[in-house]
Image (spheres, helix red, strand yellow):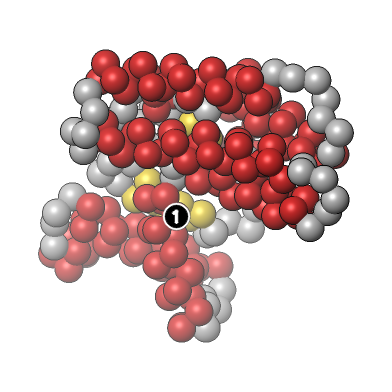
C-alpha cells in the first residue's frame, strides 16, 4: 500500500510489492516534477535515475537519531555524529518553514542554505568513521548528496523538504484498514483505493467529495 500526492492530486495504490515498477506506474510516463521520498531502495533504481528527487529530511533525521540513540548506550561519544547530522536537517526544515512563512527573504534563504550545505559536506566528506553504524549512515547520506537529492528545496522553496503530506494522507487509509478489518480480496482493495483517491483529491481541490463521486457514477 502506498500513496502519491501532488499539490492537487492524491493517488492511493494497493500493491503487493513496492518496486521501481510500481513507482513508475504511479508517476506516469510524463512525470516532470520532483519525487519526494524516503531512502527505500526502489527509488535508487537505474530506471528512476532521470527523475529529479528530494529525499525526505524527516526520514533522514529519524535515521540519524536512531544511530545516535544506539551509540549513546556504548562507550565513547559516537552519538555526536548522528546528532550533528540530524541537526543540519532539522535546521533545513526550519529554514524552509521560515521562507514559506515570510520570516526570511529569498536572499537570506539562499545564504543560510549555502551554510547548511557546507555544514553537511564537512560531516560527509571525511575519513571513514570508527563506528560502523556512523559509517553506514555517512555513506548512505553521501550517496544521496552525490545524486543531488538532499537540497533541491534550497534551490526552489516550492519543493517541500519532507514527504509529510503524503504520509498524513496514507495514515487515513491505515486507520481505516484497522477499524474495518481490511479488504477481503484484491478487487475490494483496489475499489477502496480508487474511491479514497477520488475523495482525498476532491478535498485537496476544495470540492465536495460526495458531489464528485456522484458525478462519476452518472
Residue 85 in the figure: left or right of residue 158: right
Q: Which residue is mark 1?
A: 167
Q: Is residue 102 visible?
A: yes
Image height of 19 relative to 13, above or below: above
Taking the spot 41% from the left edge, 22% from the top edge, the residue there is 113
Residue 33 in the figure: left or right of residue 116: left
Residue 97 in the figure: left or right of residue 187: left
Q: How far across and how far down the image is residue 96, in percent?
A: 34, 34
**Residue that lies at the very extreme toward the front in this rendered image:** 76
**The one of 29 and 141 positioned closer to us in this rendering:** 141
Image height of 154 relative to 68, above or below: above
**The one of 191 and 85 positioned closer to us in this rendering:** 85
Q: How far across and how far down the image is residue 111, in percent?
A: 36, 16
Q: How far across and how far down the image is residue 70, in percent?
A: 76, 54
Q: Dividing the picture into quarters, in which one does residue 130 lie?
A: top right
Q: Dividing the picture into quarters, in which one does residue 163 lie?
A: top left
In what quadrant of the picture does the N terminus appear?
Answer: bottom right
Residue 152 in the figure: left or right of residue 101: right
Taking the spot 58% from the left edge, 56% from the top edge, the residue there is 15
Taking the spot 52% from the left edge, 83% from the top edge, the residue there is 181
In what quadrant of the picture does the C terminus appear?
Answer: bottom left
**The one of 185 and 84 positioned closer to us in this rendering:** 84
Q: How far across and how far down the image is residue 184, in percent?
A: 55, 78
**The one of 114 and 21 positioned closer to us in this rendering:** 114
Q: Residues within 10 Å of mark 1 (few under 14, many from 20)?
A: some
Q: Dividing the picture into quarters, in which one does residue 200 lie?
A: bottom left
Q: Secondary structure at mark 1?
A: helix
Q: Is residue 60 visible?
A: no
Amino acid at each position: 500500500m502506498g500513496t502519491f500526492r501532488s499539490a492537487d492530486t492524491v493517488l492511493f495504490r494497493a500493491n503487493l510489492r513496492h518496486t521501481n515498477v510500481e513507482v513508475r506506474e504511479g508517476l506516469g510516463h510524463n512525470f516532470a516534477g520532483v519525487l519526494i521520498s524516503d531512502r527505500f531502495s526502489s527509488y535508487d533504481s537505474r530506471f528512476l535515475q532521470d527523475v529529479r528527487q528530494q529525499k525526505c529530511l524527516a526520514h533522514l533525521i529519524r535515521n540519524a537519531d536512531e544511530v545516535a540513540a544506539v551509540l549513546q548506550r556504548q562507550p565513547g561519544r559516537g552519538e555526536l555524529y548522528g546528532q550533528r547530522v540530524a541537526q543540519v536537517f532539522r535546521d533545513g526544515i526550519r529554514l524552509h518553514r521560515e521562507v514559506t512563512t515570510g520570516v526570511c527573504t529569498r536572499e537570506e534563504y539562499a545564504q543560510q542554505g549555502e551554510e547548511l550545505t557546507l555544514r553537511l559536506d564537512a560531516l560527509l566528506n571525511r575519513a571513514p568513521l570508527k563506528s560502523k553504524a556512523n559509517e553506514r549512515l555517512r555513506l548512505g547520506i553521501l550517496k544521496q548528496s552525490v545524486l543531488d537529492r538532499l537540497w533541491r528545496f534550497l534551490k526552489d522553496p516550492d519543493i517541500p523538504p519532507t514527504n509529510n503530506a503524503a504520509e498524513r494522507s496514507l495514515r487515513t487509509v491505515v486507520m481505516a484498514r484497522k477499524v474495518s478489518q481490511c479488504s477481503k480480496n484484491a478487487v475490494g482493495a483496489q475499489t477502496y483505493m480508487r474511491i479514497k483517491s477520488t475523495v482525498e483529491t476532491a478535498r485537496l481541490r476544495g470540492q465536495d467529495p460526495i458531489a464528485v463521486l456522484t458525478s462519476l457514477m452518472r
